[in-house]
Amino acid sequence: METTEYSQHELIVKAEHYAASSEHCVEDVRLKLRQWGASSSDEQTIIEHLTKHGFINHSRYANAFVHDKLHFQKWGRVKIAYALRAKKIEDSIIDEALENIDEQDYFTVLRKVASHKKGATREQLLRFLSQRGFTYEDIQRCL
């Protein structure tokens, strides 16, 4: 398999296209730059460039991540927060993004997920919903 060496300018252009295609955090971009063979000094320079020019914004990323994980993967707040921490997003940004969740939407998703386990016992349902990232208090309110 051939490896292509890119100049710093080419890496910036590739990273701009990558970051413009959808929301990405610094860790996503850093991983992609490593795949493209960027040096660690180039990585830092390119990430600073992308952040300065608005291609990377952790607040915007966290809000999009929360929306997508809640509505498409049907994850609860706990699992979403854990995944964002794994991507090295600051706790204050995570908390702000989680506060933006509409409670009615959240409980609609929770009820929908719970309804898929019709034959399950109460304990099985609690375990399943907690693995999905819903808190015990939220599950109790739903049931």
Image (spheres, grey):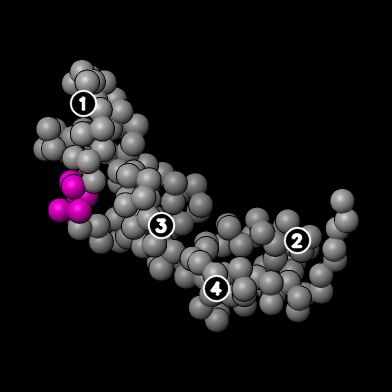
Mark 2, residue position: 36
Inter-mark Cα distance, 2 to 1: 47 Å
Tag nearer the camera, 3 or 1 = 1
- How would you classify the magenta stretch by its main secondary structure? helix
Tag nearer the camera, 2 or 1 = 1
Mark 4, residue position: 20
In the image, the segment drawn in magenta is: 103-108
Report the side of 32 relative to 126 (left or right).
right
Inter-mark Cα distance, 3 to 2: 25 Å
Instruction: Residue 42 in the image: state x and y as whole percent.
Output: 74, 69
Instruction: Give, as a three-letter code, the residue at label 1.
Output: Lys
Instruction: Residue 27 in the image: state x and y as whole percent.
Output: 58, 57
Is label 3 in contact with label 2 (beta carbons under 8 Å)?
A: no
Mark 3, residue position: 65
The vertical placement of 82 against 22, above or below, is above
Instruction: Residue 15 in the image: state x and y as whole percent.
Output: 65, 70
Which numbered disc flags the more N-terminal residue, 3 or 2?
Answer: 2
Instruction: Give, as a three-letter code, the residue at label 2.
Output: Trp
Instruction: Residue at 51%, 67% (x, y): give it.
Output: 22
Tag nearer the camera, 1 or 4 = 1
Inter-mark Cα distance, 1 to 4: 42 Å
Instruction: Residue at 22%, 41% (x, y): give it.
Output: 112
